[in-house]
Amino acid sequence: MKFGVIIFPGSNCDHDTYHVISKVIGQPVQFIWHRDTHLHNCDAVILPGGFSYGDYLRCGALASHSPVMQAVKTFAANGGFVLGICNGFQTLCEAHLLPGTLLRNNNLRFQCQFVNLRVENNQTPYTRDCAPNSILSFPIAHGEGNYFCTPDEYLKLEQNRQIVFRYVDAAGNASESANPNGSLGNIAGIINEQGNVLGLMPHPERACEEILGGNDGLQLFHSLQISIEEYLKALDK
Amino acid sequence: MAQSPAITPEIIANHGLTPGEYDKIVTLLGRAPNLVELGIFSVMWSEHCSYKSSRMYLKDLPTTGKRVVQGPGENAGILDIGEEWCIAFKIESHNHPSFIEPFQGAATGVGGILRDIFTMGARPVALLNSLRFGKLDDPKYGARNRAILDGVVRGIAHYGNSFGCPTVGGEVYFADCYTPNPLVNAFALGILRKDHIFLGRASGVGNPVLYVGAKTGRDGIHGATMASAEFDDTALSKRPTVQVGDPFCEKLLLEACLEAMRTGCVVGIQDMGAAGLTSSSCEMGARAGTGIEFDTALVPQRETGMTPYEIMLSESQERMLLVADKGREREVQEIFARWELSAVVIGTVIEEGVLRVRHHGEVVAEIPNKYLTDEAPRYERPATPPAGWEPDLGLRLAQAQARLAEALPAAARELAPEQVASTLKGLLTSANLSSREWIYQQYDHMVRTNTLVFPGADAAVIRVKETRKGLAISLDGNGRYCQVDPYRGAELAVAESCRNLVATGATPIGLTNCLNFASPERPEVMWSLREVISGMGAAAREFETPVVSGNVSLYNETEGSGIYPTPVIGNVGLIDDTRYLLSPNLIRAQHAVVLLGATFEELGATHYLEFATGSLLGPVPQLDYGREKALYEVVHQAIRASLLSGAHDLGDGGLLVALAELTFSTHGRPALGARITLPREGKLAGLSTAGLLFGESPSRMLVTTTAANLAALLELAEQHHIPAQMLGTLEGERLHVTLDGTPVLDEPVAELESAWRSALGTAINM
């Protein structure tokens, strides 16, 4: 099993993600440079948070045209696991690997705080370790996390159970006051129709050690780990 | 030598040089300078670069100690934290630019301090900032003050968030004197290997000199000179002197520099901050006893037709000057190309100790380095206390007490219960004591996954991933205290910063400082600067916290109106093992609340006094080093013996404010109620109600402990002669306080907390 963490110019959660996989989860991981045209035989690829290309033009817009993204698209089309966190989510939307887009937060300010997420679908490769409807505490840190899509796309997301995380209050209600950025339907994270590409604005890699304020993020990484193991086992057969 | 227009008295004055300074230049050179040389002298001899007014006092600060690897004089100070790891840190002002253009001024302040850190070979891991603004509800300037605050916060967020270094703490205060003179002080700390320190030295004659990073434009020309003058009504016309920052470019520069440093082909490196290419080239030569010769035509430029004068004085951001090992320049260039940055050989290190600037081969400036650095003017400016200042401390205190007694007579200090509640609510929602959440939620304070104590606590704490260690960092300044008594105000600021660190379980190991003052040409300002440095030095010696870096910002004055003397202390503490970290979220219901330290009737210059009377009067609280240090010893020993669940510095606003803050929720812990009993007997005898509840005696802390550990804690305090009083327990959902058997406060904590959290955002959005 091998994880890959892509480095775009301006990625700044690359080391944090690498740290979690290598030191906390304890799995092999390597960095993948944005100009690379292949993924070094990684079994899962993570697009980390940050400000790729300074977020100039639009968040993730320039990164989505990096040479490495062609390889990511091929990998995703073949069923490979692709996880986009924060800026990585924005990049996946810009690359049309996920529907919709991320607008500026509705208060027009960068927002950094812990939020509560409800797991809307625990049948995905990234949430299979979560209890149904469980509530996770992850930090957010973004200025453009306001998820938006067309009514048709939204309907499709709902019908296909592609909405994986919603912002909720402590009691688990997806209320307006629990929505930190104005996201449509309190959406915090979605998965593609095929179920192998996940994007979310909150940072699971910041919530993997008790000393940092909580370890709910481990549920996501453990889920992915199990999914990769199963996938590799299936290949062996 | 290139010819230039005649240097007229007007040109000299426009460069911020006095006629006397110009004469000195002519004497040193033995000839008249040309315009390029005049420009070079003007920035290097500016107050900002030369410290010409403050240098003679700064040399008295303690700068050595067993952990000091690099003291003042380099881009940042370095301390050894053990296990082959070091930290580099510094604080710097960006006051003048932030007034002219708040967003870019603050952003480039962050950019500049980050470069100071990574130019030493350190990866920046923490940012903090200390801010001062005019009052948000000022009838005339409120809207402008709010706009400046908003711009500054957005600017800091823009730069730090994108760069990927967490902004983990800081402080913000408001007073009228900062309306035309806001202060923006940015602190950065980085981590580096002890055997991998880089200095700003141009060593090795014949080594190539490379220009790396962003291209040079016409922005920021004469920024250092602008920052060395007072403002008048033409301040906004100085906007072109403010630089524009690009945090994305700086992030690339960081990665490229650290990668180049790892190859071993970097001999010396310095960032181009204030005075840009000029200061980096002559300082690197001066430190190494060499010189640098280069051609400005080779400097990467983003505008056409730039003259050598403009190239030398530009303060374009995200640039570094790098001396490489001869023959290995190609390696450096390949790394920078990988990060899509320029790296161009523009010159070489030469034996003569001169700065020789060519343009297309023709020499356009040639100045011995020492004329620009060591020989820069130094002024012993007149320093006299303000009129009516009583030199005798005893008499002065008595006079101040008398004035205070007049403004706040004994009867006025006895508050009825409803007054206690309204005062507490007033203080908790005041601009100076309310939660800073509205601000710090705009800063990414978690990136790099090291932040153990979030903003809002006494000090920020980060871990050092490679070790078990933690670092606590606190910024503290108290302009009100220093306005009343600069020497003792500075002592109190250092003590408070140490106490904030100790409250997390850390041991203070070293300081940086930013000295913000009005015009040094006024004798009373110069006097206050001297007093502050002297008080800070005394305290730094007492606490064994050497001053390893710093910055002086003078001329924070507009149309004759100056700021309070505002030294800001950046203090770093070491936690040997983060398992012994005291974080606010360890406090639980049923824990006992204990007041450590003696309380005196000290209401002078307090938040309460300002709230109750609107005045800034009376003596500042009295600092006793023996008591302060004994308090640290008790807290340290109690932590090592696992006797404490929490500790909170008892400073701004006094006991009742600190009690309320202790009960408020933190990440991972809900709010708690408290039942507190305050008998005015024994250790608390003789105090007025206001003095007990709102006085600001230093050397005190609120600590929490379990019932099982209470006796041991009290005994430990007793052994060190620190008064310790059990005040009550954390229980229920209300803050309930009984004074001499009479209930004086009974408020739901949730309501107090909600008012405290929302006050600043409400004030800004009004």
Image (tube, rainbow, N blue to C red):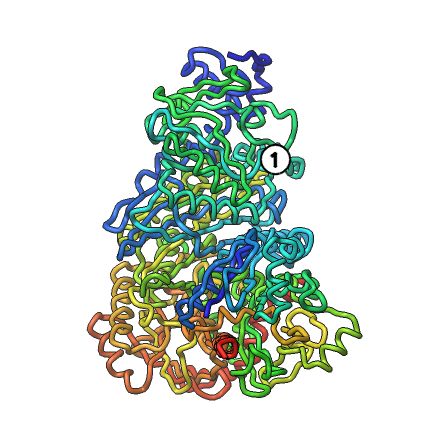
* SS under mark 1: loop
Instruction: Please name the residue that numbered disc 1 is placed on.
Output: B219
User: In the displayed structure, does residue A172 sit left or right of residue B667?
Assistant: right
Residue B18 or residue B86, whichever sits in front = B86
Count of numbered tags: 1
Can residue B134 be seen? no
Q: Quadrant of residue A79?
A: bottom right
Q: Residues within 10 Å of mark 1 (few under 14, many from 20)?
A: many
Q: Identify the residue at horizontal 26%, vertical 79% (top origin).
A: B714
Amino acid of disc 1 = Asp
Query: Label 1 lies in what chain?
Result: B
Asked whether, in this view, residue B607 is left or right of residue B82, the answer is right
Which residue appears at 39% of the width and 43% of the height? B261
Q: Quadrant of the C terminus of chain B?
A: bottom right
Can you give x and y, in whole percent of width and height, for residue B373 in the image? 39, 28
Q: Residue furthest left?
A: B719
Q: Is residue B591 depicted above or below B724 in this figure?
A: below
In the displayed structure, does residue B242 sit left or right of residue B324? Answer: right
Q: x, y percentage for residue A230?
A: 50, 79
Q: Work out whether residue B516 or residue B137 is closer to the camera in this orientation and state it.
A: B516
Whole-percent x, y for residue B236 in the image: 66, 39
User: Can the viewer see residue B649?
Assistant: yes
Residue at the limit of the structure toward the front, as seen here:
A237
Position of residue A30 measured from the top left corner of the image (x, y, whole percent): 46, 61
Point 40% across, 56% down: residue: B619
Please determine whether, in this image, residue B296 is positioned above or below residue B32: below
